[in-house]
Image (cartoon, rainbow, N blue to C red):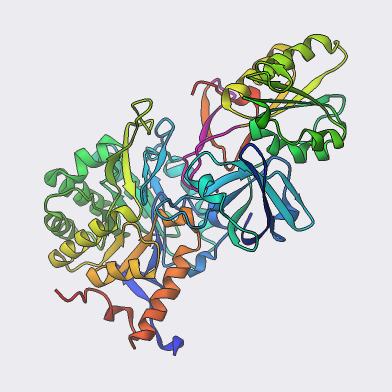
Amino acid sequence: MQLEEARIVQHTEVQGGYRLLVMDAPGIAPQVKPGQFVHLKVPHLGEALLRRPFSIFKAGEGRLSILYKSIGQGTNTMKYLQPGESLDLIGPLGNGFPIPAEDTLPALVAGGYGMAALYLAARTAPVRGLAFFGGRKSDDILCVDEFEALGWEVRIATDDGTRGKKGLVTAVLDEWIGQKGPAVVPEFFACGPNPMLKAVADRAAAGGWKAWVSVDRNMCCGVGACLTCVQKIRTPDGGWTWHRVCREGPVFESREVVWDE
Amino acid sequence: MTNEIDLSVNIGGIRMKTPVMVASGTFGYGPEYADLIDFNQLGAIVVKGICLEGTKGNPTPRTVEVTSGLINAIGLQNPGVEGFVRNYMPFLRQFDVPVIVNIWGKTVEEYEEVAARFDQVEGVAGLEVNVSCPNIKEGRGLFGTNPDMFRRVLSAVRTRTRLTLIPKLAPDLSHIGSFAKAAEECGADALSLINSIPAMAIDVETRRPKLGNVTGGLSGPAIRPIAVKLVWEAAKAVKIPMIGIGGIMNANDALEFMIAGASAVAIGTANFTDPGTAMKVTAGIRSYMERHSLTHIKQVVGTVKT
């Protein structure tokens, strides 16, 4: 973890309001593990004080990139950033995804730009598996080509049926689970809205498989000091304790998570 | 000449290299920021509030960003005295920076017990007595805003520790001067002011409060003018030094507090924006003094021309 003034080298719209921001960050980029994030101080944000956390999409050769959509004050201001401008980053933060276990078939499950957090996991996994992408409409399904280029089979669902199957990503997942045969032991890696994570956790629990979920929480300091982004995690005595999503997370083994909030 | 400028201060017996500290609740227990800044350049570290047995704090969401500020309702989640001393004091002792422990309790006896325990702990320079947290009912209602209970808890704590004692005052007092005076009479060595201001935010679409605890405490630049005024008022009532806290983002903000009467300042919410704020504030105070041909920080404190 370090503070770094990163320089923007590319800022382009991917599709449907999703943007790719590529930065020169020679300090942070080489340290990045799949599933980690950066805490970004958005310039020109005026009265809004806090940094914004973003999953790291890609990292390599001294650069890192994030993929975002303008949905609030911070991301609406970010869309005006220009190449050459500096960005104040803290990172890399969080624990990230583990390497898939031997003898399992990795299955990525992403809601919307949750796929951004899974790209590096897809690239570094020793075995190629399946990627399940869900979104509201076709614009929310991103970077399918890039996952396919890495050798992953991508299966898609959209709420309105404009791309892939109509419905939730978990329906496509269920279909695959029903067909895959008993010899295939999946290990899930998921990033997306919390209801989707819980749905993946339920499938994993039913099948006796492992699922790693990247939990989304309102965040403040990003480094573990303020105790804003806490998540209930089970303890061996049957109780629970708070874990900090920014520090002990954002990735948890789904059986540890108490899904009551 | 930079090397002629003396920024050192003595806050109720605690010597600090710079008057710029980091405020309780915004700096964790230290390790969280260790990779990002040099602790030896801080005036002091005030760690997050500790009670006797520890507590899990409030439900989520625990903070919400608002115009020029932040409302928090963490609920003083902490590992308790023993957990803190075991897990964090060995780390904190490595640095050449005073450690001040923010303490709180649910009864006068609990405050006393916590103070007595820390009196025996190597490496603790002082106790900031939290009688003003907006997120636990015992903090404010019982001790922070009731003059009799305020005196009782401070007198009791004073009998149990020789450490520098720094009550942290609530902001919503009709006569902050009388509370400051009462603290001084009970043996306080310095004062911290202000704590966050009771506040609330509502999501108009769902009509639900934005915080799990419903209400919280507002901090950040939004509260700074209120804090400066309270420091100025309290300064007129007491002789003990004061630590000004409330939305300090830069050196000018810090200087406002010091000119109003604070001998030191603490950086709070700004740590979340930029963990290097305290160092930048110290550098800015130094250049202000150069510009005004001042050699000692005392030449700034309490010099407001009214």
Residue sitting nearer the eye, B299 or B84: B299
Is A40 situated left or right of B224 in this image? right
The spot of residue A64 in percent (x, y) is: 71, 52
The spot of residue A165 in percent (x, y) is: 72, 17
**A94 within the magenta span:** no
Quarter of the image for residue B182 reads bottom left
Screen quadrant of the N terminus of chain B: bottom left
The spot of residue B104 in percent (x, y) is: 32, 44
Can residue A213 be seen?
no
Can residue B291 be seen?
yes
Assign the magenta stretch its main secondary structure.
Answer: loop
Is B186 situated left or right of A181 in this image? left
* Residue range highlighted in magenta: A215-238
Is A33 situated left or right of A128 in this image? left
- Above or below — where is A181 with respect to A251? above
Is B302 situated left or right of A2 in this image? left
Quarter of the image for residue A175 reads top right
| Residue depicted at 40% across the width and 39% down the height | B74
| Residue depicted at 86% across the width and 30% down the height | A128
| Residue depicted at 61% across the width and 58% down the height | A82
**A228 within the magenta span:** yes
- Residue with the most extreme bottom position: B1
The spot of residue A79 in percent (x, y) is: 57, 49
- Above or below — where is B95 with respect to A128? below
Residue sitting nearer the eye, A248 or A192: A192
Screen quadrant of the C terminus of chain B: bottom left
Residue sitting nearer the eye, A76 or B126: A76
Residue sitting nearer the eye, A64 or A146: A146
Quarter of the image for residue B295 reads bottom left
- Above or below — where is B66 with respect to B30? above
Badge count: 0
| Residue depicted at 64% across the width and 22% down the height | A255
